[in-house]
Amino acid sequence: MKMKPISILEDRKNQVFTKGDDEFDISCGKKSLAGSVSQRACVFCGSRVVLYPITDALHLVHGPIGCASYTWDIRGALSSGPELHRMSFSTDLSGTDIIYGGEKKLEKALFELIDIYRPKAAFVYCTCIVGIIGDDVAAVCKKVEAKAGIPVLPVHSEGFKGTKKDGYKAACDALFSLIDRSREEIPEKIPLSINILGEFNIGGETWIIREYYKRMGIEVVSVMTGDSRVEDFSSSHRACLNVVQCSGSLTCLAQKMEKEYGIPFIRVSYFGIEDTSKALYDVASFFPDRPDIMEKTALLVREEVAAILPELYEIKADLKGKRAAIYVGGAFKAFSLIKALKHLGMEVVLVGSQTGNKEDYALLKDMCNPGTVILDDANPLELAKYVLEKDAHLFIGGVKEKPIAYKLGLGFCDHNHERKIPLAGFEGMKNFAREIHETVSSPVWDLVPRKCFVDVLK
Amino acid sequence: MLLRHTHTEILPREALTVNPAKTCQPVGAMYASLGIHNCLPHSHGSQGCCAYHRSALTRHYREPVMAATSSFTEGSSVFGGQANLIQAIDNIFTTYDPDIIAVHTTCLSETIGDDLYQITNKAVKEGKVPPGKHVFHANTPSYVGSHVTGFANMTKAMALYFSKSTGVHNGRFNIIPGYVEPSDMSEIKRLAREMGIRPILFPDTSDVLNGPQTGKYKMFPQGGTPLEDLVSTGDSMGTIALGPLASADAARALDGKWHVPCRVEDLPIGLSATDRFIDALRKAAGVSVPDSITRERGQLLDIITDMHQYFYQKKVALAGDPDHLIPLVEFLVQIDMMPIHIVTGTSGKAFEKQIQALTAHLPCKVNVKAGGDMFMLHQWIKNDPVDLLMANTYGKYMAKDDDIPFVRFGFPILDRVGHSYFPTTCYRGGMRLLEKILDVLLDRMDRDAPEERFELVM
């Protein structure tokens, strides 16, 4: 059965591809077209999520109330100590502030908060409006910092200044500034040490990964940013290696640290058996004069894999041949998901991201079977159309895709940052497999009129 | 303790909102727009706004929420968003084919001073709006008012834009339901029809945001006020506006423009407020109240009398929107409960005065604050504990921290189902509210009862 075609905007035609059918030259990294029902977010969102897991810092949103309301405790970034990051602080700018400027209010707000909570540092997030009314946020931060004696850092995350990716960069700038100014005056490297970058301790993932490194004999100096404390960053510059996950968000920080402190970096993923093992082996092989580390790593991987394989085999038997659609924020996550789903015997029929670049999409294309639909910055109509056309059993995406998947009558896995179940590492792979199994094999899909091909427009 | 950061000492806060009890105008405008049939809401601002609002509504309703965005860039922020909006209008009609685009502004587009009348007129002149299709707008600057203000502004805008008068009465009544759930909108319609009235309810999100699982994804679900009905509002016999803050402006606009007489009533929450609503319908349409409604009223009263001993002097803390809180406080006082801490995030001195009047005879101190926040409410609770908390989902932190029986009420509810299907307005809604209140109060008694006093019959 063939679906009625939906119209894809002329200008978006190069952002949708089917492997095998089309000459592959995806266009991406573009601004979303005005008028599209894009699933993308803004600069502020990018900054807010990257810095959020610094749990003993103050996170003050400078702007009207909305930006603070929507980001109040929205991530599953767990803390083993302070939970100041879960509060929502806003300067709640009103009409008069827009006319006369919000600097005085911001200063007052910072002092009031610092007095009460004695945070170890403060981040001030600039929202759209702050960029327009021209508050000198950096100057206010400087003034407050001088009086309060803690780092007070502006995050230049005005929403309109680009995409979520630009927000990651703004966050990296602020974070680098914090690292640089709080760094202790000891230049020597800490032996056998790393920083973990791009790991946000969603559902305790950082704790899982840290434990692996401990067993390997590697010291984790700091995590950016998962269960982080401000003081952790004072020796970040002394790590031997930066291990960067979720490359979209923190690569620019890794590059900066390489330039300033000479710390090399590698890109890894802790999702799925293959990628987790590779990450650990890559780190171990960075210390070639310590073969014992590689031995410990091999042992760890063997033990951990052996521990989860029996259950994975059971699950695989049920999932074999089922089809999955993936639509996530960063393309790097999609790579790992494809591998992990293959491990579970599933076939990926659609894959897309909000922020992938050309190389990402080329790699995605290589990883996928012919016929797979590849999308950049997709809208709900496109997603619904291809999911039906490819007859998927599972959709992996975020909050806005979830009800669409359920309306269509297919399983869903929320692979974003709101969850509190860890999906990283070997243990995470087991959780992931269970989650997929739970939704794909659910009998509720037998109750719904599942394979209805309709014109999704009307 | 999740909210260990709440201290009991109440210090003056001048420049800060902590843990907001409101959000910004555009989300309310988006919600109202979804209550028009075949209408796509459009956010004229940065991408993030639209993404946040869609996510917030998606989480609350567990339904796909569609809206487009002008995707502002740095360029549009300097040179104005005209080009973006015109392109958006063109793209939306080409791709998604709605009948109506409801544009709302954001803090960004308001501050740079985009003239939406001029831009939409230009779009019409340039032929970007196909014949029979419509684009209208509401100004919803995020730095003024709250989500309720945004709802009110959009509702007023739809009344003003669409209504026409042929000079001949259509024999119908306009009912503006206020910022309530789709379930409440259905319930209000049902009661009006039961009275023999043919209502034009606008906006009407029933069957838009509480749709069934059909195995299909429809971008524009079957519900929403039809265009013809909106046009016809100028010919109606009268308008009943429920909830002064959310609905009065639209009702008065119709009165001013077409001399459609209006009555503004409280939201029909609880016994007396529903009585007033029914009475308003009765008088306006010159009909008598059918037995079926009298019976429903009697059933609500029956629960009240049956269970009154459990309400006796129970202290209650409330957070919510002004239109909801006023009739709710009236209802709680009426059944012998004592609402002692009442916070709304929306500013307005009239609210405080009304609550003070409703609670004047209570034998205890009552704290009330318009333009307050959840943090303040929590501090009040810590200083003077309560037996029951009613608030949106964010109340659960306080409930957990201080072990308070908790009823979810208001927007948003992110962690339970039911609100979109079962009303809390009118007599049946009152019964449901009491059921919820009694459930948590009696569960608490059961939990805390020593074994010898554990009661079978309550």
Image (tube, coloured by chain):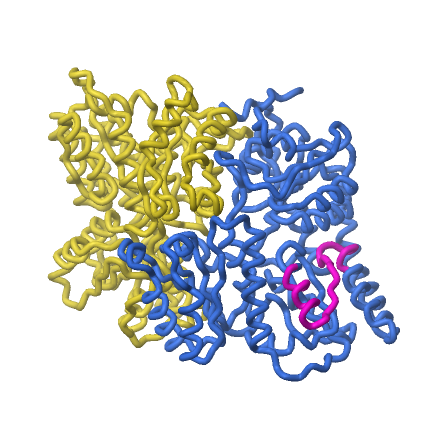
Chain colours: A blue, B yellow
Query: Is B296 covered by the magenta stretch?
Result: no
Q: Position of residue A65 (x, y in %)?
A: 36, 55
Q: How many marks do you count on the picture?
A: 0
Q: Is residue B121 above or below residue A436?
A: above
- Where, by quadrant of the figure, is residue B15 drawn? bottom left
The residues colored magenta run: A252-276
Q: Is residue A167 above or below residue A193?
A: above
Q: Is residue B335 visible?
A: no
Q: Is residue B129 above or below residue B387?
A: above
Quadrant of the image containing the N terminus of chain B: bottom left
Of residues B19 and A80, the one nearer the viewer is: B19
Left or right of residue A173: residue A25 = right
Of residues A442 and A30, the one nearer the viewer is: A30
Q: Position of residue B296 (x, y in %)?
A: 24, 37
Q: Is residue B74 above or below residue B262?
A: below
Query: Is A265 covered by the magenta stretch?
Result: yes
Q: Identify the residue shown where x is 45% and y is 66%.
A: A138
Q: Identify the residue shown where x is 58% and y is 30%.
A: A11
Q: Identify the residue shown where x is 16% and y is 24%.
A: B237
- Where, by quadrant of the figure, is residue A274 drawn? bottom right
Q: Identify the residue shown where x is 47% and y is 44%.
A: B75
Of residues B411 and A434, the one nearer the viewer is: B411
Q: Position of residue A113 (x, y in %)?
A: 38, 72
Q: Is residue B18 visible?
A: yes
Q: Position of residue A29 (x, y in %)?
A: 62, 43
Quadrant of the image containing the C terminus of chain B: bottom left
Left or right of residue B88: residue A223 = right
Left or right of residue A415: residue A160 = left
